Image (tube, rainbow, N blue to C red):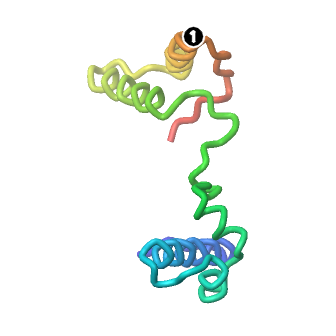
Amino acid sequence: MPPIRSANAQKLAEQEGKILLALSDLQEGRIQSIRAAATLYAIPRSTLQARSDGRLSRVDIPPNGRKLTQLEEDSLVQWIISMDERGAAPRKATVREMANILLSARRSKDISQHAITIS
């Protein structure tokens, strides 16, 4: 069953699809200008121009408060899974300590007590 989305989320998803189609048409030469593509697909010209210049969508941009890189986060997750498979699932405090070890290797600020979420 497909996910239930709010009207605004549905509109944003549709617009994202239109932007990707417009970019594809521009790259393949089916549409000659960004202005024509924006008009044809009924999307903002400025958004299409920014995406054409390489800017990411808001969904794809990592949050400002993110401290760990994706590689560090993935390795931390693998460490947690490894510990759990051995029957010693780490507590939040232990995960925080491990994250702080990763950050100290880069000389970054420590992870706060409330930053760790378990999903």
Tally of numbered tags: 1
Residue placed farthest to the bottom in the image? 40
Horizontal side of residue 80 vs 73, given as left or right: left
From the image, which quarter does the N terminus lie in? bottom left
Q: Nearer the viewer, residue 117 or 40?
A: 40
- Nearer to me, 92 or 112: 112
48 vs 100, nearest the viewer: 48
Where residue 14 sits: x, y (%)? 57, 78
Where residue 111 sits, quadrant-wise, is top right
Query: In the image, residue 41 lies at what x, y percent?
Result: 60, 85
Tell me which residue sits at (52%, 83%) in the image.
Answer: 31
| Residue at 56% over, 14% down | 106
Please say if 33 is above or below 65. below
The relative height of residue 18 versus residue 56 in the rendered view (above or below) is: below
Q: Is residue 72 left or right of residue 51?
A: left
Label 1, residues with CA under 10 Å away: few <14, some 14-19, many ≥20: few
SS of the residue under disc 1: helix
User: Within the image, what quadrant is residue 115 found in?
Assistant: top right
Q: Position of residue 82 (x, y in %)?
A: 30, 24
Where residue 12 appears, as percent x and y from the top left, is 63, 72
Compared with 66, 7 (above or below) is below
**Which amino acid, by three-letter code, is at mark 1?**
Ser
The residue depicted at 68 percent of the width and 28 percent of the height is 114
Q: Residue at x 35, y 18 (%)?
A: 88
Q: Nearer the viewer, residue 32 or 37?
A: 32
Whether residue 44 sits left or right of residue 62 in the image: it is right
Q: Which residue is mark 1?
A: 104
